[in-house]
Amino acid sequence: MVRSALSMGNRPLSRGARSGHEIVPALSVALASLLAVLPIVSAHGWWPNAGLLMLLAWRMLRADTWPAWVAAPLGLWNDLVTGSPLGLSVALWTAFMLAMDVIDRRTMWRDYWLEWILATLLLILAELAQWRVAALGGAPVRVASEWPSLLIAPLCFPIAAYLVRRIDRWRMGQ
Amino acid sequence: MAASAGPRPGWSRRAQYGLFFGFVAAVAAIVIGFIMLVLSLVAPNSYSAVRGAALDVTAPLSSGLNDIATTVTGLASGAGDYCNAARQNGDLKRQRAALMRRMVEAKAVLLENEELKRVLALRERERTTVATGRIVGSSFESPRRFAVLSIGSNDGVAVGMPVRAADGLIGRVVETGHFASRVLLVTDRANIVPARLLRGGLTVIATGRGDGTIDVRPLEVGRNPFKRGDIIVTSGTGGLYPPLVPIAKIVRLDDDGAIALPLADPGRASFALVEPPFEPAALAEAARPAGER
């Protein structure tokens, strides 16, 4: 009786990974970067970088999805699509991957809140880097008009984490 | 959940080497990315071909999505307009009558203006339009204010050309692909427009603030000359922007200047006109990066 209750009907526990499951994470990050082509003409630059959100969410979920250098081509793609200074995401995203490797060795456990805090720190770091690069490029925007983006990016991270969870289940055939 | 231990290779020599070379590749990528970033800050034109190609690839997507969005919002607002058609009709008739009176006045002024110019024998510079396109996207993820225009170098668009809508100035072209181009909006912090106060003609400087508003300062320090509702127009100084294009309307005063809202909303404007620079010599000047000027 216990056995039949646990057997979940005819559904197998896992169907096994889908073919091409290795490229799904990178593909989802590249597609998220491509959200920048949406025809949103905004007076503010408050929206978070969807590619970075997905990248961090994948890295938090699985440490072994990709080697750290994969962030470099993904960052290049992101720079080209979003129109930010070429090289910004390449350096920043790869540095984030290495930082996550270090953090993985230092932290004893991992839970929802800790992941959110780590993601918040990295996202704020990314926004500040973007702000600093804009200032170096001749557009020193006041910090006072930038704080909404510092707030919105961390609040969007759980959405990215949820999406990545769903995509991961789908690609692994669970 | 226990933290994933990260990539721990164990005793396998091959796995250890793999991990080490992965690390070396990541560090190399950071260094290369940093060099690329420095290059794109110091010499922004060095990647113009690559960035133009990226624009060509992504802008048609934005353009198609923009068409869909316009249709959907058009249907929604069209249905809304039917609901209070009678009241709207009355309002519009009143507005039309008022505008008619203003137009007759304006025509009289125009006639007088032409006569005066003939007396002074001033040569009127002909204003042409290089191409007409639509704003299909923007940099909604970054502190910079850029917009994507649906026309590129195939239509004659070149870096430095001013872009305007029917309502007022939008910005200037900073990157071109074959079928699309990127526009630096007047609200960007790096866009400085020589301007005049329409009331009185005082020379002012309009600088974007990066959050959809424009900072306006008088060129001469002194009493704050602005009033709420004042219109700022381009002065034509510098030769890039043609004169007398409306830029913004003052909404708030601060101690020695004012904050203004741009008159042309790039999100609402159905068409964007690319014009040749007022003085063609200014094009070469604009193509040079900001640091050298």
Image (tube, coloured by chain):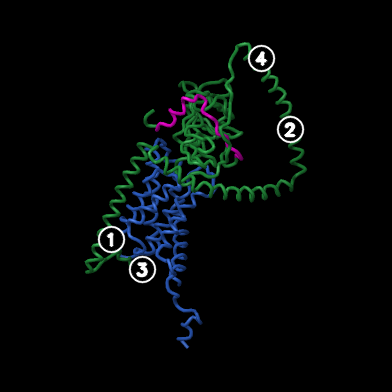
Expressed as whole percent of the image width and height from the top left, the position of residue B46 reads 38, 39
Side (left or right) of B192 relative to B85:
left
Q: Estimate how packed mark 1 is, as few (under 14), some (14 to 19) or many (20 or more) residues with alpha carbons within 10 Å.
A: few
Residue at point 28%, 52% (across, down): B27
Q: What is the CA distance from the residue labelled 1 to the residue labelled 4?
A: 81 Å
**Circle nearer the N terminus (4, 2):** 2
Q: What is the CA distance from the residue labelled 1 to the residue labelled 2?
A: 71 Å
Q: Estimate how packed mark 4 is, as few (under 14), some (14 to 19) or many (20 or more) residues with alpha carbons within 10 Å.
A: few
Mark seen at residue A163: none
Q: Chain of mark 3?
A: B
Q: What is the CA distance from the residue labelled 4 to the residue labelled 3?
A: 84 Å
Identify the colour of chain A in the image. blue
Q: Disc 3 designates what residue?
A: B1
Q: Disc 2 designates what residue?
A: B96
Q: Which is in the foreground here, disc 2 or disc 3?
A: 2
Q: What is the CA distance from the residue labelled 3 to the residue labelled 1?
A: 15 Å
